Amino acid sequence: MSRLEEKTIKTEKIFSGKVISLQIEDVELPNGNTSKREIIKHPGAVAILALTDENKIVMVEQYRKALERTIIEIPAGKLELNEDPKTCAIRELEEETGYSCKELELLISFFTSPGFADEIVHVYLAKGLVKKENAASLDEDEFVHLMEITLEEAERYIREQKIYDAKTAYAVQYLQLQKALK
Amino acid sequence: MSRLEEKTIKTEKIFSGKVISLQIEDVELPNGNTSKREIIKHPGAVAILALTDENKIVMVEQYRKALERTIIEIPAGKLELNEDPKTCAIRELEEETGYSCKELELLISFFTSPGFADEIVHVYLAKGLVKKENAASLDEDEFVHLMEITLEEAERYIREQKIYDAKTAYAVQYLQLQKALK
C-alpha cells in the first residue's frame, strides 16, 4: 500500500482565539507535489446523553451564533486545559443541567470535522441523575433552556430539524438501537 | 420562555481560504452584556454510506492533516458553489470510489460543530452500485485507499479508533440499527 501521509513544510499561524486557533500548513503530498491545508485547532469537548429515572433525555436548547438559530442538543462543553474528559463530563452536566450522576460511561469518541479541524467529542451516557442543591452555574456568556424529552419527541425534533447536530443525532440513534436490541 | 438569541454588533473578517473562512462577531447576549464569537464558515459537505450488492460498506482510508494520521471514513466531499447536495453526493461517490449508484436516499443532515462552525453534512445511503468505466477522478491534492468492508469489520475499526469521525460513526450505527430492526 502506498503511503498517504502529508509532510508539513511550513506552518503559518493566522489566529489564536478563546475557543479555536487557525493555521495554514504547506504540505508535501504523497506524489511529491505541494498543497496548503487550513487547520482549526480546538481543545476537544464532551457531550452527555443523560437519562432520567423516567427514561427521559436531558436536552438543552441553545442559540448557536454560527448557525444564527437555536437548536436542541445534548449537554456539552469544551475541555479545559489538561482536563480529563470524564471530569469535564461531570462538570458540564452539572453546569448545564444542575444534575450530578451516579453512573457515567463513555459511549464513543469521534472527530467532528476531520477535513479541517482536530476537534474531538467524547460522548458519555449518564444515569442515576440527582438534582444538586447548589449546582455550579453556566459560563457568563452561556444561556440555555433545559428540557427533558422522550425518545419519540427526540425523533420528532430530528425530523423537524430542531435537533440538528452530529453528537445529538448520534445519541438519539444510540437510544433507538438500544430499544431495538431489547 | 426568555429569548436566547445573540444579536451581531460587529463582524470582523479574519481569514478567507479555499475551504474555510474565519470571522469574529461581537454579539449582544440575552442579558444585554456583550461577548465575542469565533465563527468558521464552510460550504457544507455530503457523505455517502454506499453498500455493495454483497452488503459491504465502501470506505476510504485518507490522511487527515488536522489529525496528523489516516482514518477510515465513508466517502465524502465539499459542496461546490450552489451545488445541489444530491448532485454532489453522486459526483463525490464517483470521484472517490469509481461507483455510480441506482438508488440514493438522504438519511440525515447535521451540523458537525455548531459551537464554532456552520458546516453541515448531508448523509446519503447509496445502493445498486455500478463500477464506472471512465470514472471522474479525485482532486489533484486528494489521495485515498479504497476499501470494502463488512459491518463486523466496521465495528472492529470503531473499537480500534481507525474509524474515528462523526459521520462514519453515525453511518455504522445506522447499519447496526437496521440490522437490529430486522
Image (cartoon, coloured by chain):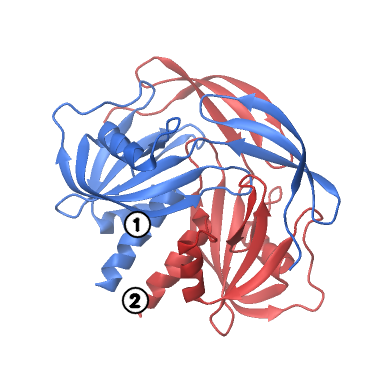
Chain colours: A blue, B red
Residue A26: in sight, yes or no? yes
Q: Secondary structure at mark 2?
A: helix
**Could you tell whether B168 is left or right of A150 in the image?**
right
Residue B181 - label: 2
How far across and how far down the image is residue B9, in percent? 52, 17
Q: Secondary structure at mark 1?
A: helix
Q: Up-down: is B24 above or below B56? A: above
Q: Amino acid at mark 1?
A: Val
Near mark 1 (Cα within 10 A), the count class, few <14, some 14-19 or many ≥20, is many
Mark-to-mark CA distance, 1 and 2: 15 Å
Residue sitting farthest toward the top: B33
- Residue drawn at the location 80% of the way across and 51% of the way down: A29
Q: Quadrant of the C terminus of chain A?
A: bottom left
Residue A131 - label: none
- Residue drawn at the location 38% of the way across and 70% of the way down: B177
Are labels 1 and 2 assigned to the same chain? no
Q: Which residue is mark 1?
A: A172
How far across and how far down the image is residue B182, in percent? 35, 81
Q: Amino acid at mark 2?
A: Leu
Residue B78: in sight, yes or no? no
Nearer-the-camera pick, A86 or B170: A86
Place residue B140 in its image quadrant. bottom right
Q: Quadrant of the N terminus of chain A?
A: bottom right
**Could you tell whether B85 is left or right of B111 in the image?**
right
How far across and how far down the image is residue B57, in percent? 56, 73
Total marks in image: 2
* Chain under numbered label 2: B
Q: Up-down: is A31 above or below A179? A: above
